[in-house]
Image: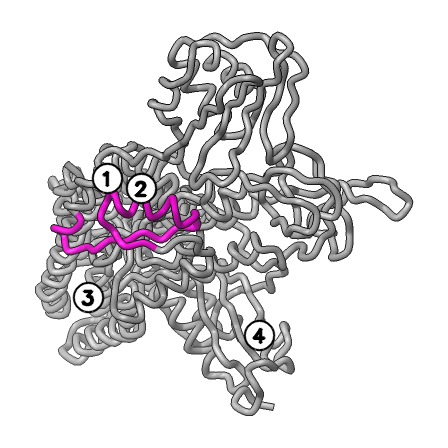
């Protein structure tokens, strides 16, 4: 049965880890190779997670898929989890980079004497010392390239690491030959410089990818690791989250997070769902109500019958939405993808033509090989490889000094092109901290303020805490109460001098409020408002000047959202789910918009990942900060237009870097083909082009001013 004959519902979806995939060329090769199989409906590589997701005919088993990936030159293993387990792509490269750079610098110091005219025994001594340093260093530092190249060649294929490996090995071999026969030149320093620059580029890229991978892990960490399960005999036993199943009954104590979705069958309590909905006010849940994994039980123990566990929970679904959205969407990566298909065969062809042409012209095999090696080295795409990551790192440093942390370097490119902005309300446009109305507090007598503080200080409810903080800031001291108790979802009560005192949720009051009642006295209503972030209005004006139109999209209630929208003059959507936010972004993108999402909660995670670029405040949840491309540490929303301006400046520099790199190749390649460049000069020219790109990128040091 072929993929064309099978119905979509018949397809299986398998996820394989491909740890050796590291560039756009790898991504293109895997996708093209697997999609060419008649039993594969689609194959999509996620470079950030180092995985490939394959939709395929069920008859195409794991072993066959593994074999097909091996034929393409990639080791693989079937993943048994739905989301990727983070790993570091940087650590394996740091050792080779350090060795290549250190050995290269030492050999260059030895080469100074040779360049200065050292001859005879002195020159030979320096050459032998260089060889003793270089050969082990090249063998160690070149492993990432040699291993990748060999994996491709043994399957009769090629990749970008093949010409690099050939150039390094042949240059090292010819250099050793020169040392043995007492020749004048050796190019060990050129080979090591080449490896050092290539490794530096890969480290910079891997650093950015490692940061992006931690979002999924932070997301899953919001659920409890397990729960106390009530058996049929009434006994309680601890059960790990992955072993929970529908029908089990969890006993969730106050202060615990839920490990699975379910329905309350006994008890009632208030639940903090801010990570899922973005709404800071806890919600009351009674018997028969649904509660979700990752939410926090605030007040009282409840028994919950599990409805969805493990990968079927709402939390896990949000995590999958986030992982599905972490594909690298950089236009320059797509350019690199196309260039990768042509680079290896083009360079091989140029080098081969150079060798054959010079042999036909009467040059010896040694001179012809030297010219071929020079072509391989001088065409190394170091400058092109550094054009983007170096600019990203310099701009990231500038933004960090301005209080804006860059989590994903490729997002700088995407942020530079945004023309729409969707902003969450609670914790994003506002500070996310309810503040009691000053006039309401002023209307209370001193005794009422002290009684309100006495009750509020005994509760963990966010509104009680906000009220207690505000009253304490007025130097109010609490009175002593007796019989203090808290009714979940209702409020606090106590006794003062024989009179009952209550701090309760008022009935039939729109908005967020509490009511203080002292027996025999009037009811004092205290309303709360979430203050706008500093600079909110000015930031929106600057975004408008930058050509970015903004609107609000929030999981909070309509009254709260409409109030903020009215203050800022924005359109708004309220009470939306995480999937709704993601759908809204997809709709705007389908219309040609390039969307910036700014949010702070777990409910914003999929939207932050799906948008063209995303930002979160430093007060955001762990998931919000991990999922976002940018995190601004200051309270002011002016960080948003500042980041946009810096990103646009960065992309101007990136385009200049590409122009410089292309210009270098236009002039350097003909010189190498004509035999006017030795491997050493080729390495120096290649390094010089890289340094020019780096120097141009350093102009971004003050990009975020």
- State the SS at label 1: helix
Q: Which residue is mark 1?
A: 536
Q: What is the CA distance from the residue labelled 4 to the residue labelled 3?
A: 42 Å
Apparent side of residue 348 relative to residue 361 in the rendered image (left or right): right
Q: Residues within 10 Å of mark 4 (few under 14, many from 20)?
A: many
**Quarter of the image that includes the N terminus:** bottom right
> Mark 3 or mark 2: which is in front?
2
| Furthest residue in direction right, as rendered | 233
Q: Mark 2 and mark 3 in contact (Cβ < 8 Å)?
A: no
Q: What is the CA distance from the residue labelled 3 to the residue labelled 2?
A: 62 Å
Dot 1 or dot 3: first in sequence order is 3
Q: Quick check: 178 above or below 395?
A: below
Q: Which residue is mark 2?
A: 429
Nearer to the camera, 639 or 560: 560
- State the SS at label 2: helix
Q: Which residue is mark 4?
A: 65
Residue 229 in the image, given as x and y percentages of width and height: 78, 44
Task: Name the colouring of the figure.
Answer: one colour
Q: Which residue is mark 3?
A: 371
Q: What is the CA distance from the residue labelled 1 to the residue labelled 3?
A: 61 Å
Apparent side of residue 668 relative to residue 82 in the rendered image (left or right): left
Dot 2 or dot 1: first in sequence order is 2
Q: What is the CA distance from the residue labelled 2 to the residue labelled 1?
A: 7 Å
Q: Quick check: 174 above or below 402?
A: below
Nearer to the camera, 281 or 361: 281
Question: In the picture, residue 593 is in which quadrant?
Answer: bottom left
Dot 3 or dot 2: first in sequence order is 3
Question: Start and end of the magenta stretch?
Answer: 543-572
Residue 220 in the image, given as x and y percentages of width and height: 56, 48
């Amino acid at each position: 049965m072929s993929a064309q004959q099978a119905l979509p519902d018949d397809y299986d979806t398998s996820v394989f880890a491909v740890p050796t995939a590291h560039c756009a060329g790898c991504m293109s090769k895997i996708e093209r190779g697997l999609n060419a199989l008649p039993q594969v409906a689609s194959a999509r590589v996620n470079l950030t997670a180092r995985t490939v997701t394959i939709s395929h005919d069920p008859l195409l088993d794991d072993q066959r898929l593994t074999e097909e990936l091996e034929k393409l030159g990639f080791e693989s293993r079937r993943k048994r989890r739905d989301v990727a387990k983070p790993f570091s792509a940087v650590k394996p490269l740091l050792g080779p980079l350090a060795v290549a750079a250190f050995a290269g610098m030492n050999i260059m110091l030895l080469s100074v004497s040779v360049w200065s005219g050292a001859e005879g025994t002195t020159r030979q001594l320096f050459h032998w010392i260089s060889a003793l340093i270089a050969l082990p260093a090249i063998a160690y530092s070149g492993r990432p390239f040699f291993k990748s190249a060999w994996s491709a060649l043994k399957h009769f294929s090629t990749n970008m690491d093949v010409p690099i490996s050939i150039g390094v090995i042949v240059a090292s071999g010819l250099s050793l030959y020169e040392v043995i026969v007492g020749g004048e030149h050796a190019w060990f320093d050129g080979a090591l410089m080449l490896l050092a620059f290539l490794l530096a580029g890969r480290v910079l890229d891997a650093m950015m990818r490692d940061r992006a991978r931690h979002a999924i892990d932070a997301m899953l960490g919001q659920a409890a690791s397990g729960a106390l399960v009530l058996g049929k005999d009434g006994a309680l036993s601890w059960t790990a989250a992955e072993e929970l199943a529908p029908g089990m009954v969890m006993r969730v104590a106050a202060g615990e997070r839920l490990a699975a979705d379910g329905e309350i069958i006994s008890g009632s309590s208030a639940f903090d769902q801010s990570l899922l909905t973005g709404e800071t006010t806890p919600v009351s849940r009674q018997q028969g109500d649904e509660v979700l994994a990752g939410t926090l039980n605030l007040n009282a123990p409840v028994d919950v019958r599990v409805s969805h566990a493990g990968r079927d929970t709402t939390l896990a679904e949000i995590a999958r939405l986030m992982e599905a959205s972490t594909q690298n969407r950089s236009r320059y990566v797509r350019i690199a993808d196309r260039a990768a298909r042509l680079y290896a065969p083009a360079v091989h062809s140029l080098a081969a033509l150079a060798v054959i042409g010079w042999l036909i012209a009467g040059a010896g095999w040694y001179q012809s090989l030297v010219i071929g090696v020079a072509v391989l080295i001088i065409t190394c795409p170091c400058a092109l490889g550094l054009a983007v990551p170096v600019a990203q790192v310099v701009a990231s440093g500038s933004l960090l000094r301005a209080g804006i942390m860059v989590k994903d370097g490729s997002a700088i490119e995407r942020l530079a092109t945004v023309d729409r902005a969707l902003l969450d309300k609670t914790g994003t446009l506002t500070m996310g901290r309810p503040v009691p109305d000053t006039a309401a507090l002023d209307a209370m007598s001193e005794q009422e303020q002290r009684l309100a503080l006495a009750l509020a200080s005994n509760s963990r409810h966010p509104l009680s805490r906000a009220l207690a903080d505000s009253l304490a800031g007025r130097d109010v001291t609490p009175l002593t109460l007796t019989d203090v108790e808290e009714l979940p979802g209702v409020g606090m009560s106590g006794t003062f001098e024989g009179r009952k005192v209550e701090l309760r949720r008022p009935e039939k009051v729109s908005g967020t409020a509490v009511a203080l009642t002292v027996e025999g006295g009037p009811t004092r209503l205290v309303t709360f408002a979430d203050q706008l972030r500093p600079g909110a209005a000015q930031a929106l004006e600057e975004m408008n000047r930058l050509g970015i139109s903004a609107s609000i999209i929030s999981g909070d209630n309509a009254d709260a959202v409409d109030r903020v929208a009215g203050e800022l003059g924005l359109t708004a959507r309220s009470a939306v789910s995480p999937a709704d936010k993601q759908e809204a972004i997809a709709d705007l993108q389908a219309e040609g918009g390039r969307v910036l999402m700014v949010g702070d909660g777990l409910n914003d995670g999929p939207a932050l990942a799906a948008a063209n670029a995303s930002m979160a405040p430093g007060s955001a949840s762990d998931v919000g900060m991990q999922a976002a491309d940018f995190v601004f540490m200051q309270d002011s929303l002016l960080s948003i237009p500042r980041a946009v301006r810096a990103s646009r400046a960065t992309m101007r520099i990136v385009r200049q870097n590409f122009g410089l790199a292309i210009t270098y190749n236009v002039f350097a390649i003909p010189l190498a083909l004509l035999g006017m460049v030795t491997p050493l000069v080729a390495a120096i020219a290649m390094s010089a082009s890289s340094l020019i790109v780096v120097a141009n990128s350093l102009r971004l040091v003050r990009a975020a001013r």
